[in-house]
Amino acid sequence: MRGKCSVEFMSQSVSRRVREFHRLFPDYQPTPLQSLRQLAKKVNVDKIWIKDESFRFGLNAFKVLGGSYAIGVYLSKLIGVDEGDFSFELLKSQEYKEKVGNLTFITATDGNHGRGVAWSAKVFGQEAVVFMPKGSSKYRINNIKKENAEVVVTNEYYDETVKIAANFARENNGVLIQDTAWKGYVEIPTLIMQGYSTLIDEIMEDLEKQGESLPTHVFLQAGVGSLAAAIQGYLITRFGDNRPLTVIIEPHNAACLYKSVKKGDKKPHSVKGSLSTIMAGLACGKPNILALEVLRDYADFFVSCSDEIAAKGMRVLGNPLVNDPKVISGESGAVGLGLLIEILENKLFSGFKEKMNLTEDSRILVISTEGDTDPDHYRNVVWDGKYPSR
Ligand SMILES: Cc1ncc(COP(=O)(O)O)c(C=O)c1O
């Protein structure tokens, strides 16, 4: 691995610590890992597993894993305890009130991360202000408001909204909990990425319990790339060269990781403009600089997708073959499964199938990172057939 970046920040000891932290939450439960046996048979592969993050802490998406860990560690440092010694009893203590006082956590989001930050701030007895890009879904806005956060919808797209949140935090003595890193802002995003390790750790634990061997392929959707890089890092530190192949997926109009890796000059490259896609969680024009390094050095494939691929994934997961479980998966959640099916079934993509070595022995893991976070749009796609397959 000479010449490649270090992934020590995603070490197994870090993942164990993160998992212990999440177990402190009274509502913590691993989310389900489902095996789509009939679908695997139909598309002629050995296994398709799908991790269903719609069950995460009742918040309908995985994102809270990152924000909660970052806020937990931040607060633990203020109180002077290791995050492993953090407890909900401590929250009620006079010491907590004296040492921490009243804080405001600030973030920008297209929905899921902000909801996770708002929820975590509430759980820890603090406040949150959440900035959202223009055009944000009313459901996603209301769900954040329900967590007692103040929501500000800007007149800008996602990347500018992140800047607005960062400036607001600086000017108002707030604590920025942003899920992407840039030069000079890496500590919190590193914690957020570490927080995501609980998701892959649960998967590996489930597979082990079921006596299953490792997946051969992992399909990972990406916005800024934090989730994909966290999982990539975990797979490297746990399995080294025996790790599964990884496929990184972005929307056509927001493929900033694809663009940056393709340029080959080791710099982050942005995608500008409206980033128009139904995959709101993946509509990010600037890569996380830490995630980009990890993915550039270790990920195996980068693919950009049209919205129709995500829509197909939503329909397949919502209308399973007999005896397969149903998974309610939103636009950003379903694109991995949509792409997999398209590659396996559409002759136009047989070149991809060969390159990725997808065969009848393949065991593929996909992650449904969100449920129907915009229920109207979910039904437009799944009931009314919006974004039909081409
Ligand atoms: C549902 C969903 N899936 C995937 C992602 C992508 O995560 P990241 O921005 O870390 O690449 C997001 C980001 O907000 C999301 O909301």
Image: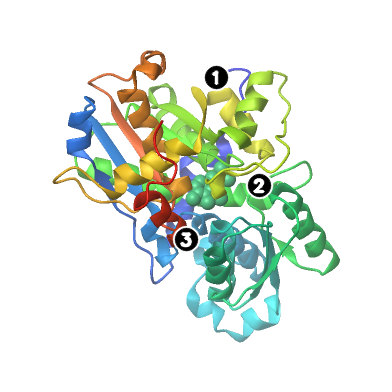
What is the secondary structure assignment of the residue under circle 1?
loop
Does the numbered disc 2 mark a residue whose Cβ is under 8 Å from ligand 1?
A: yes
Q: Residues within 10 Å of mark 3 (few under 14, many from 20)?
A: many
Residue shown at the point (68%, 56%) measured from the top left: 133
Disc 1 marks a residue whose amino acid type is: Met
* Residue position for label 1: 1
Q: Is residue 22 rendered to the left or right of residue 194?
A: left
- Tell me the number on the disc at residue 180: 2
Gap between marks 2 and 1 measured at Cα: 25 Å
Mark 2 vs 3, N-terminal side = 3
View extreme (bottom): residue: 94
Examine the rendering and report whether any part of residue 196 can be seen.
Answer: no
Q: Quadrant of the C terminus?
A: top left
What is the secondary structure assignment of the residue under circle 3?
helix
Numbered disc in front, either 2 or 1: 2
Residue shown at the point (61%, 63%) measured from the top left: 71
- Residue 318, placed above or below residue 75: above
Examine the rendering and report whether any part of residue 77 can be seen.
Answer: yes
Q: Is residue 88 rendered to the left or right of residue 3?
A: left
Mark 2 vs 1, N-terminal side = 1
Residue shown at the point (36%, 15%) measured from the top left: 350
